[in-house]
Amino acid sequence: MLVEDSRVVRELLTHIVGRDARLEVVAAVASGEEALAQLACARPDVISMDIRLPGIDGLETTRRIMAEHPTPIVVVADSVEDSSLRISMNALRAGALSVVEKPVATTHAGYDAVADEICTQLRIMAEVPVIRRRPIGTQWAVRGASPAALAPFPSQAGRPTVLAIAASTGGPPALARVLGGLPETFPLPVLLVQHMGAAFMEGFASWLNGVVPMPVALARDGERMEPGRVYVAPGDRHLELGSGGFLRILDTAPVGGQRPAATVLFRSVARQAGAGGIGVLLTGMGEDGAQGLLDMRRAGAATTAEHESTAVVYGMPAAAVRLSAASAVLPLERIAGHVLRAAMPETSP
């Protein structure tokens, strides 16, 4: 099902989907109300959702679909407007699975790449099982919130110095859940990789900054990391931890088809921080991050993969589990507490 209020864009999306023999348009509607009305009879496997709609917007439509007729949703958004980016991120939090850039015209320079990405995301997301759910609440995402008291974590060989965390499909709400469970006074810097179109990364970082206690921003090359701050890999660039706690932003080749790649980040943390690293791999399609997490574990770091029971897509964490790269495999709601314990190991008397 295509949900798009612009007739021109709706026809363009119909044309794009029609190019892929594995996809079929069962409905193309101009409003959220129409989408909800036709959902039961059209029974789409996946929905392409515009954000700016007349009447109820794409965010509210997403919420209602996920509460009443859970269906995989791909947000198709205008990446230029800040307000659209914020709404798109909140749609991901409400249950949408991914966000892709809206096509402009067949004559546009990046049209083919955008069209291919839309079809790829629709095909992939059509296979993702979704369940009826309420939007993730905000009780775990309030600045200044105090965490519950936690028992000390068993001693590691090295004093924790950095947390590296990565996700792909389903990542934004999962990252918000984990980082939202950490206090503003979290004692380590946080390095983060999220697979997402380059045009959306600044908006993603801005959105995350508004829903978790720690300040969040895109990482800058040569920047020295500081405790209690979250550094997000910028769009289409690798993020590495360099010597002396300085960050490196690289445009070297993709690794495993990804740039930024979780494996690149994790391997750099293994090299520079050794047993002082903490690595977390969350929901995502593919296998990115698994080999890097294994490097971290071999270096003595505490490593965690999200459990299958909560992962939207159990691809990346599953790959890590197969490699025995994760020293702990936990459902999403337990990861923040585990990370806090790892960041505060027992000290010798």
Image: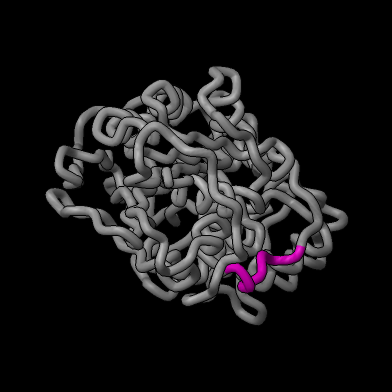
Query: Can you tell which quarter of the image residue 291 is in?
Result: top left
Q: Is residue 136 magenta?
A: yes
Residue 10 rendering spot, x and y as whole percentages: 56, 59
Residue 269 rendering spot, x and y as whole percentages: 31, 35
Q: Is residue 256 magenta?
A: no
* Total numbered labels: 0
Q: Residue at x 61, y 27 (%)?
A: 318
Question: Residue 8: in sight, yes or no?
Answer: no
Magenta: main secondary structure equals: loop
Residue 187 or residue 118, whichever sits in front: 187
Residue 248 or residue 82, whichever sits in front: 248
Tell me the magenta residue range.
Answer: 134-140
Residue 173 rendering spot, x and y as whole percentages: 57, 57
Residue 28 or residue 311, whichever sits in front: 311
Residue 313, above or below 174: above
Q: Residue at x 56, y 24 (%)?
A: 319
Residue 34 or residue 339, whichever sits in front: 339
Q: How is the image coloured?
A: one colour
Residue 65, above or below 162: below
Residue 332, above or below 66: above
Question: Residue 58: in sight, yes or no?
Answer: yes
- Report the residue that reaches farthest toward the right: 41
Residue 193 rendering spot, x and y as whole percentages: 39, 45
Q: Residue at x 81, y 61 (%)?
A: 38
